[in-house]
Image (cartoon, coloured by chain):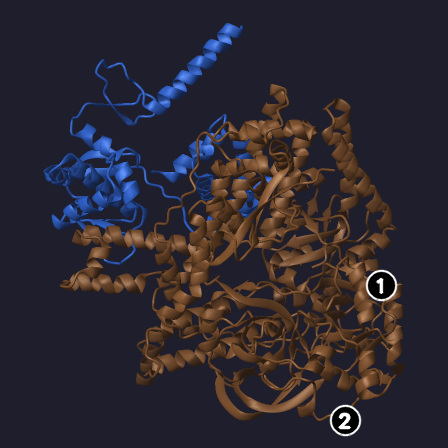
């Protein structure tokens, strides 16, 4: 949610790996380029710092000549947008009551997600009036709702017909506006990251969810209550443990 | 075309960003350059030959050395692998690099004009300083400039010496147009093969003919929008031999031999210092004897020569800087002193092809009915449909076409050869995917008008008979010059087929005025005088064909001619367009002027101008031919030729107006509060006819536009469901729409990133789409395909496989990255071919360094690629030749191909063929 903090955390990481470049290395480079620009670096400095970051991530596999085009492009692009510095989004009581009044868990999760996104974009831009321009695919992924694109659109149509949302009439840009933002009511929930929003909602509603002890994402409580970590963290912890184990054996 | 007769040479190609990143001091090894695709092949040219001479590099010895090295490499690759062999292979590769790589010559691709200025202050590569040498016309369009080492590793002042030689001791006090001079000097960088000096060269004035004809005159000098005037009896001046000359059959015969072509060349494209053009074979000595009854001729300097001592006649439009020399002897002596030689860039064939592909520019201005369109696409469609059945022989015909009985496949691609040897390969997923890609490409090409028609693409020359009448100073009036009359051309190919009328096209073209119907004529006199010209279009000197074909000249320009009924019957006869001619200012040539000329030429605006005109055709389809809108668009389309001309002029430093923005940018037609009523009315009219989007069919040319279009359609659909609960297709069909629905439908069309009106090309595109909608091919993979038939069956060590596997992964990643970036950048096919060749060679070297034995290597790569579902391209690229050898030995050296036979049992694309199986003689 807070790009500034995200960039700082990434750069402060001790042992950077190729996976730290993320699924889209260009997005990561863009984020860092904007970060460096924000802290007062000039074009030449940004180029060198990005190259240094790539070198830290890719190590021996880093070939400067292969990345020059991309670095130059991101340096130019970084002038366009500043970093998004949003720490959290607050959901109020009246908003939550409206969401909970909607029939069906999937609808509720999607509406909750749309609300968070709209409020997030309101914070990013003063001009935004409760709109979100994220693709349906991404909205539903955030809402942890799996539906075909056709059914996603039909679900939005339901919410539209009930008056909870507006759909943009600018053809080709299916942006959604949330109609029930109420910042005046009491705060009931604070969301600090744009991930698994559907699960966050279910957790708030009292369903059997706990938080991963490492990263904090909501995870379904297991029957025996032994699960402490999300899948990703569990894998990493297993790997760390195996490393230590093998190290001990080799000693 | 003749093949290059020397080993391939390589030069560095660096980006300005890369040089600036390295603070103008680049250090790069050859292997690094090769790995980063920065070492590119370069064809031999006069400039490269000069570099070798300056460096005292003996080419003949180098050629012998290269042959020896290649032979030794071949032999080592057949031997069992050993440490010594590996070491020797590295040494051989290094020795080959030393011969092939020309480090004195570096090409730089510029990202911006600022980078160009910065690098012109000087930069170093591996410690050697470089200086701007030249920008070739094709290079500068792609913002690429050639640099030369100031002082090279042999302590030669290369830039100074090469630059001096390229100037060929011309009279430097003469004022010239810098951009033109740069282009003329760059002729020394054209890929060419040197040939012997002719025995006697004559330079004559161009033949300028005057006549009257109906034309459309466009002038944009004093107005924002061009003034178009139709003039019935305009004075037309035509240079009938613009860039064309003549050679004696004796010279043609000698040069044919030197170029290793097995026929007497009818025409070839010639180069020398400041000299460019097409010379055609014509017996001008016989002309002197039999027609002019004279054997003396006067050259452009006023010197008299005996024609029987002349073998080559150049015109002043060929020898661009003729007036910078005092005589032909002066010019030729200076050429000898500076190591310039006559060289040939292209030998034209002596037979023309039977079929040729159209492109959308030729079709878009026609008024074709749906039935006409179906007829036009049917040969292409039936050819593709035939191959969908998965029949082995039809697949062979699709991939290779028909060949003659003596075919031995030596020149062919390894996949095609292998398929001819082993039909089992039709079960191989790699082969199937390759065929699918070819089919898909062909279908997509058909959608953008790449349609097969009966016709040929052939070079044009001015009537050589008329040129000789001029050379011998015969007293013939302009209207009697030559053997051909207005509206006629001579083309032996069509004469032999007894075709008497064809329609002519030449790209780039913009409007129907660029299409001309011409009569094909022949007579005994023509057959006699044009006997050495079996495969050229000979133009008459009495009509506006050259003007109609967008300023065609005879320095190598080609025409597509076809007798296709649809195109011939629907061609309308319209006057040629004459655009106002502007002349660039002549100046004393300095380095600063040349740099400025290079900068002016960066980029290519002709393509974008042509696209805007294409867009206008689709908007025009919305209106009736009588409407004001239709007529205004017709005018704008005609003006397109002027703007194409202006885009070319801009590269010559001529200030010319670009197309008015109001024609293609609707923002410029925005109505302002301050606008008067007249202005508002004009803007509203302009808004209706603005061509601000590409037409639908162009989605198949621009993949990024296709992605944008598909995203729009998808978004509009989800938006429609979200708003109305029904899909966009249902909404469009719905008869009783609400106001909101009607509004949505209207904006759906307005916001669409392409226009999909009923222009000919959009209709043609939809017709092809309909033909192949959801096509399924019967070519299916068989999981049981046994790839071991391609193996040699030798044993190898597992560690070799692991090392090759690493290389395989690198290869895949590099290849995939390039495929993505080249699609986005719409890299041209030549550049892609160069990339592939360089990539394959580099990885072959890497593989050979690990496993020098080619038989063993073949088995290793096949096991890597074929034991998994991942890409098999690597196996074919690295070991294609060995796979062919293995398959030949598996099939007792037998291979099959198809030949034309009217009683054959294979029917493909409307013709009959028969299969022939032969045994290859193994030496």
Q: Position of residue A155 (x, y in %)?
A: 18, 44
- The chain painted brown is B
The foreground one among B749 and B783 is B783
Q: How far apart are the two marked residues, 2 and 1, measured between alpha carbons?
A: 35 Å
Question: Label 2 neighbourhood size at 10 Å, few (<14), some (14-19), many (20+)?
Answer: few
Q: Residue at x 56, y 30 (%)?
A: B789
In the rendered image, residue B370, in percent from the top left (x then y), is placed at 35, 69
x 71%, y 62%: residue: B346
Q: Mark 2 and mark 1, same subunit?
A: yes
Q: Does residue B350 appear left or right of residue B727 in this picture? A: right
Q: Is residue B41 left or right of residue B166?
A: left
| Residue B579 visible at all | yes
Residue nearer the viewer, B229 or B159: B229
> The C terminus of chain B appears in which quarter of the rendering?
top right
Q: Which chain is in blue here?
A: A
The residue carrying mark 2 is B475
A26 sits to left or right of B146: left
Residue drawn at (63%, 34%) of the image: B892
């Amino acid at each position: 949610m807070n790009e500034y903090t995200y960039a700082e955390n990434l750069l402060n990481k001790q042992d950077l790996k190729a996976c730290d470049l993320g699924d889209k290395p260009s997005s990561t480079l863009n984020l860092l380029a904007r970060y460096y620009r924000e802290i007062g670096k000039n074009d030449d400095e940004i180029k060198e710092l990005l190259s240094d970051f790539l070198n830290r991530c890719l190590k021996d596999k880093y070939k400067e000549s292969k990345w020059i085009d991309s670095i130059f492009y991101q340096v130019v692009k970084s002038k366009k947008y500043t970093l998004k510095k949003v720490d959290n989004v607050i959901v109020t009581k009246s908003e939550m009551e409206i969401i909970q009044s909607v029939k069906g868990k999937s609808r509720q999760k999607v509406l909750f997600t749309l609300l968070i996104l709209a409020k997030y974009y309101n914070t990013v831009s003063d001009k935004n009036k409760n709109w979100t321009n994220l693709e349906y695919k991404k909205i539903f992924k955030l809402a942890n709702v799996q539906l075909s694109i056709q059914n996603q659109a039909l679900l939005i149509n339901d919410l539209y017909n009930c008056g909870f949302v507006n759909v943009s009439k600018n053809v080709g840009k299916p942006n959604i506006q949330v109609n029930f933002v109420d910042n005046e009511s009491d705060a009931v929930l604070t969301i600090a990251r744009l991930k698994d929003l559907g699960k966050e909602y279910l957790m708030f509603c009292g369903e059997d969810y706990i938080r991963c002890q490492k990263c904090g994402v909501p995870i379904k409580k297991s029957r025996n209550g032994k699960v402490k970590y999300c899948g990703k963290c569990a894998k990493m912890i297993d790997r760390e443990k195996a490393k230590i184990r093998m190290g001990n054996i080799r000693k | 075309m003749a093949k290059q007769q020397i080993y391939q040479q390589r030069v560095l190609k660096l980006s300005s960003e890369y040089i600036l990143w390295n603070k103008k001091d680049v250090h790069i090894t050859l292997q690094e350059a090769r790995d980063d695709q920065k070492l590119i092949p370069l064809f031999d040219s006069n400039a490269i030959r000069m570099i070798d001479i300056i460096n005292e590099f003996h080419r003949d010895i180098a050629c012998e050395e290269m042959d020896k090295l290649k032979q030794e490499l071949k032999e080592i690759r057949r031997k069992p692998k050993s440490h010594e062999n590996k070491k020797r292979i590295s040494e051989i590769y290094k020795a080959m690099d030393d011969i092939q790589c020309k480090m004195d010559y570096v090409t730089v691709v510029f990202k911006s004009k600022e980078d160009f200025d910065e690098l012109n202050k000087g930069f170093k590569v591996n410690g050697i300083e470089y200086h701007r040498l030249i920008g070739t016309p094709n290079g500068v369009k792609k913002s690429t400039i050639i640099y030369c080492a100031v002082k090279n590793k042999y302590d030669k002042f290369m830039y100074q010496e090469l630059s001096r030689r390229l100037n060929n001791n011309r009279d430097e006090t003469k004022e010239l147009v810098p951009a033109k001079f740069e282009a003329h000097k760059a002729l020394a960088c054209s890929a060419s093969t040197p040939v012997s000096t002719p025995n006697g060269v004559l330079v004559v004035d161009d033949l300028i003919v005057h006549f009257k004809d109906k034309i459309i005159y466009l002038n944009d000098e004093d107005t924002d929008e061009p003034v178009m005037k139709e003039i019935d009896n305009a004075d037309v001046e035509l240079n009938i031999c613009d860039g064309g000359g003549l050679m004696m059959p004796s010279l043609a015969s000698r040069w044919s031999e030197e170029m290793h072509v097995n026929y007497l060349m009818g025409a070839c494209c010639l180069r020398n210092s400041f000299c460019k053009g097409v010379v055609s074979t014509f017996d001008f000595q016989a002309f002197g004897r039999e027609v002019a009854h004279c054997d003396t001729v006067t050259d452009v300097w006023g010197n008299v020569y005996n024609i029987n001592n002349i073998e080559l006649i150049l015109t002043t439009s060929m020898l661009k800087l003729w007036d910078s020399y005092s005589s032909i002897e002066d010019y030729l002596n200076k050429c000898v002193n500076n190591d310039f030689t006559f060289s040939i860039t292209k030998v034209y064939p002596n037979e023309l092809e039977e079929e040729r592909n159209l492109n959308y520019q030729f079709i878009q201005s026609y008024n074709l009915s749906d039935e006409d369109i179906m007829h036009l696409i049917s040969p292409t469609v039936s050819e593709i449909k035939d191959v969908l059945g998965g029949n082995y022989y039809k697949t062979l015909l699709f991939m290779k076409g028909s060949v003659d009985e003596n075919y031995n496949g030596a020149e062919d691609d390894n996949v095609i050869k292998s398929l001819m040897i082993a039909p089992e390969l039709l079960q191989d997923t790699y082969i199937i995917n390759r065929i699918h890609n070819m089919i898909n490409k062909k279908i997509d090409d058909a959608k953008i008008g790449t349609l097969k028609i009966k016709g040929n693409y052939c070079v044009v020359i001015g009537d050589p008979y008329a040129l000789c009448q001029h050379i011998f100073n015969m007293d013939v009036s302009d209207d009697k010059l030559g053997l051909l009359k207005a509206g006629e051309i001579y083309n032996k190919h069509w004469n032999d087929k007894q075709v008497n009328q064809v329609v002519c096209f030449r790209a780039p073209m913009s409007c129907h005025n660029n299409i001309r119907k011409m009569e094909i004529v022949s007579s005994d006199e023509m057959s006699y005088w044009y006997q050495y010209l079996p495969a050229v279009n000979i133009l008459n000197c009495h009509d506006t064909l050259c003007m109609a074909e967008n300023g065609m000249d005879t320095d190598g320009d080609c025409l597509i001619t076809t007798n296709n009924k649809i195109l011939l019957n629907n061609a309308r006869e319209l006057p040629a367009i004459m655009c106002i001619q502007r002349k660039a200012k002549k100046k004393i040539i300095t380095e600063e002027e040349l740099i400025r000329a290079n900068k002016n030429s960066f980029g290519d605006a002709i393509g974008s101008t042509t696209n805007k005109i294409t867009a206008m055709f689709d908007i025009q389809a919305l209106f009736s031919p009588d409407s004001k809108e239709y007529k205004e668009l017709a005018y704008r389309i005609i003006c397109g030729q002027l703007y194409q001309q202006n885009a070319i002029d801009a590269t010559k430093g001529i200030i010319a107006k670009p197309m008015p923005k109001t024609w293609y940018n609707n923002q410029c037609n925005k109505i302002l509060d301050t606008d008067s009523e007249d202005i508002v009315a004009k803007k509203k009219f302009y808004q209706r006819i603005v061509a601000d989007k590409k037409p639908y069919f162009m989605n198949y040319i621009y993949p990024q536009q296709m992605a944008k279009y598909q995203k729009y359609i998808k978004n509009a659909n989800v938006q429609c469901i979200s708003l109305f609960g029904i899909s966009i297709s249902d909404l469009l069909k719905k008869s009783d729409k609400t106001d909101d629905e009607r509004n949505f439908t209207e904006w759906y069309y307005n916001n669409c990133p392409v226009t999909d009106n009923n222009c000919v090309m959009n209709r043609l595109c939809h017709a092809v789409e309909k033909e192949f909608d959801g096509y399924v091919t019967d070519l299916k993979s068989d999981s049981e395909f046994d790839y071991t038939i391609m193996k040699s069956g030798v044993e190898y060590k597992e560690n070799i496989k692991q090392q090759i596997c690493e290389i395989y992964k690198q290869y895949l990643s590099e290849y995939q990255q390039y495929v993505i970036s080249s699609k986005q950048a719409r890299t041209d096919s030549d550049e892609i071919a160069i990339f592939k060749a360089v990539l394959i060679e580099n990885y072959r070297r890497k593989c050979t360094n690990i496993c020098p034995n080619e038989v063993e290597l073949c088995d290793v790569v096949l096991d890597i690629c074929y034991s998994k579902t991942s890409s098999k391209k690597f196996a074919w690229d690295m070991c294609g030749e060995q796979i062919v050898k293995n398959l030949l030995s598996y099939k007792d050296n037998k291979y099959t191909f198809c030949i034309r036979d009217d009683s054959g049992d294979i029917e493909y694309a409307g013709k009959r063929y028969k299969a022939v199986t032969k045994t290859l003689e193994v030496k």
